[in-house]
Amino acid sequence: MARASWRDRIATARSERVATSRTRVRRTVTHRDGAHCTVDGRSLLNFCGNDYLGLSQHFAVTTALQEAASREGAGGVASHLVCGHHALHAQVEHALADWLGVPGALLFGSGFMANLAVVQSLLDDDGLCVQDRLNHASLIDAARLAGCRLRRYPHADAEGALRQLRAEPDAVAMLITDGVFSMDGDVAPLRELALIARAQKALLYVDDAHGVGVLGPDGRGSVAEAGLSVEQVPLQLVTLGKALGGYGAAVVGDADVIAHLAETARPYLYTTALPPAQAAATLAAIGIARREHWRREKLRQLAARFRERARTHGLELLPSDTAIQPVLCGEDARAIAMAQQLEQNGYWVAAIRPPTVPEGRARLRVTLSALHGIGDVDGLVDALARARDATPAPMLETAG
């Protein structure tokens, strides 16, 4: 029998994506100016980025980046345990631990790498990883690559998590959830999950990529907003590329676990450290995020305004009070058509389709930033209503 052709496989997969309106196209940004992007020669108001606090182009942040690069160079040179661990990396880890009120922190090149590092270092073939069904892809992939048993519970269903843990009472276990869910914008039931993890002797790990900087006292995230301590949530993921406007990530929490990761986590041991200049930019961003509370307050006001006006127009929303405000469209083709209508009116909003979200739940993922104004939000909602009316939902077939 002849070997199957990898080119045929690629062509078949491409044809299937075309047929189901699931092709992916990269857009090239040629210039950014605050909340505006120049794309294909047109200036668009960006409502699909994750620069929640508006820090990515803040003068103090970019100045710190430039000054550190002029002194220390452009790259990270080596892995942390060879010769890549710079004093600026240590300062970022200390600043994050101090801000979030935890004993330790460990820097990684990305949130994807950090999640893989945590699960691979703490679970093996005999381990159990219980996760929310809507967790980020990096958490799902981390469990699969770690080789542990992955069990998923219905979204935000704490009792479902308990059932999964009880089903394997003898296994070393982790209970993992997003803090703020990236596609729905809602917050996990962290207090209930913490109680369950403690009762079941499982380690609770919260990926708070979309929460830190935005939620909780002083922007310390969803774990702090829930009033939970490091004893209840031993590990959290903090991204540096969303509310803090930079790049990279950190795992923060229990000192013993952090030390274990630093010596055993393959994505930490075998990759180049972040550039020190990027660490300098993150240090500046942390300082601004901690002291400029008005940025979080403005986000809350914008989210409330968006939801109020969206309801007035009859737009279908999900229950979110965060900077992530999904507008449900249903079918993939309708989400794409609405996104195109918005772009014609000067707004950039991403259409999110399966497999990123469940079947039949395609949406426009609106994300808000402290750089937006009330007028920007009002204009977007009006444009969303016009786009919906211009692309009505398909009629459902009924039995005759």
Image (cartoon, rainbow, N blue to C red):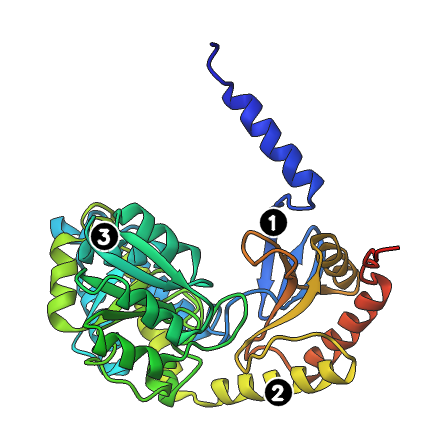
Give the CA distance from mark 3 to mark 2. Answer: 40 Å
> In terms of image quadrants, where is residue 68?
bottom left
Q: Which mark is residue 120?
A: 3
Judging depth in this view, the residue of 18 and 88 nearest the camera is 18
Neighbour class for label 3 at 10 Å: few (<14), some, many (≥20)?
A: many
Name the amino acid type tagged 2. Ala
> In terms of image quadrants, where is residue 300?
bottom right
- Residue 282 seen in the current view: no
Name the amino acid type tagged 1. Thr
Name the amino acid type tagged 3. Gln
Looking at the image, residue 133 lies above or below residue 289? above
What residue is shown at x 50% (from left), y 70% (from top)? 51
> In terms of image quadrants, where is residue 270?
top left
Residue most toward the front?
400
Give the CA distance from mark 1 to mark 3. Answer: 35 Å
Question: Which mark's residue is nearer the viewer, 1 or 3?
Answer: 3
Residue bearing the label numbered 2: 304
Looking at the image, residue 302 lies above or below residue 283? below
Q: If you read the primary sequence from the N terminus, does the residue marked by circle 1 or circle 2 appear first?
A: 1
- Residue 206 picture location, percent across and down: 33, 71
> At numbered mark 1, what does the secondary structure look like: helix, strand or loop?
loop
> At numbered mark 2, what does the secondary structure look like: helix, strand or loop?
helix
Neighbour class for label 1 at 10 Å: few (<14), some, many (≥20)?
A: few
Look at the numbered discs 1 and 3 and tell me whether their residues touch, using CB distance below 8 Å: no
- Residue 329 picture location, percent across and down: 71, 64
Count of marks placed on residues: 3
Is 215 situated left or right of 11 in this image? Answer: left
Residue bearing the label numbered 1: 28
What residue is shown at x 23% (from left), y 47% (from top)? 77
Q: If you read the primary sequence from the N terminus, does the residue marked by circle 1 or circle 3 appear first?
A: 1
Judging depth in this view, the residue of 335 and 175 nearest the camera is 175
